[in-house]
Image (tube, rainbow, N blue to C red):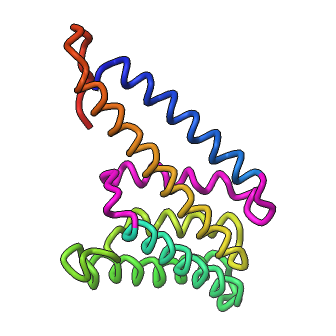
Amino acid sequence: MTRTATILWCILIGALTGVYAIIWANLPTVQNYMWIAFIALPLYFCCGADPKLFLQHAVCAVCGVLWGVLTLALLEMGLFANPNVGLFVILLVVVGVCCIVHMVVFPPTVLGGVLSNAPMVFGGYAGIFSQGRTQALGVIATLIGGLALGVLIHMGGLMLRKAAASQPETGEPQLEAD
């Protein structure tokens, strides 16, 4: 991508993020969760930025929220006299089982890999811890909103790259490909 196209893409990223923020700020049930989208957004790009994997990312984010809800529910039960011991044991069991499920039971070769995105699972897990288990639907909506923002940013970059490639050579330096 040329330097000019990259600069235009950066401006597009800012514009799309601004529109997203305005939309989220005006949704009364999830306005305080806007930042959670910025858990899903970088994970989308770090996991390959492939719009075809949107469903996998979304399913895994939802799974992460559900694992987090389970963890918080177990912690709230006060199963251990010492809260630090309870936190350790519950996290050992839940996170261990979560990793086994998403990395061993459902590797990328099973079910088309739809349950195998462990980073996105942990993104969902992190999001629910900030809001509490009763806010699962808002957290899920915001994570999916962040993924949608990632897809729009990615597609905008592809369109700019294509437009720049169709222009005659200007001698402008090319930036490294994604």
Looking at the picture, does residue 166 appear above or below residue 18?
Answer: above
Q: Is residue 17 left or right of residue 12?
A: right
The quadrant in which residue 24 appears is: bottom right
Residue at the spot x=24%, y=19% of the render? 174
Q: Which residues are magenta?
A: 26-54
The quadrant in which residue 99 appears is: bottom left
**Does the magenta portion include 102?**
no
Residue at the spot x=58%, y=35% of the render? 15
**Camera-side residue: 79 or 116?**
116
Quadrant where the N terminus is found in the figure: top left
Residue at the spot x=24%, y=27% of the render? 176
Q: Position of residue 156 (x, y in %)?
A: 41, 40
**Camera-side residue: 95 or 152?**
152
**Does the magenta portion include 35?**
yes
Looking at the picture, does residue 167 appear above or below residue 110?
Answer: above
Q: Is residue 11 left or right of residue 87?
A: left
Quadrant where the C terminus is found in the figure: top left
Looking at the picture, does residue 106 appear above or below residue 2?
Answer: below
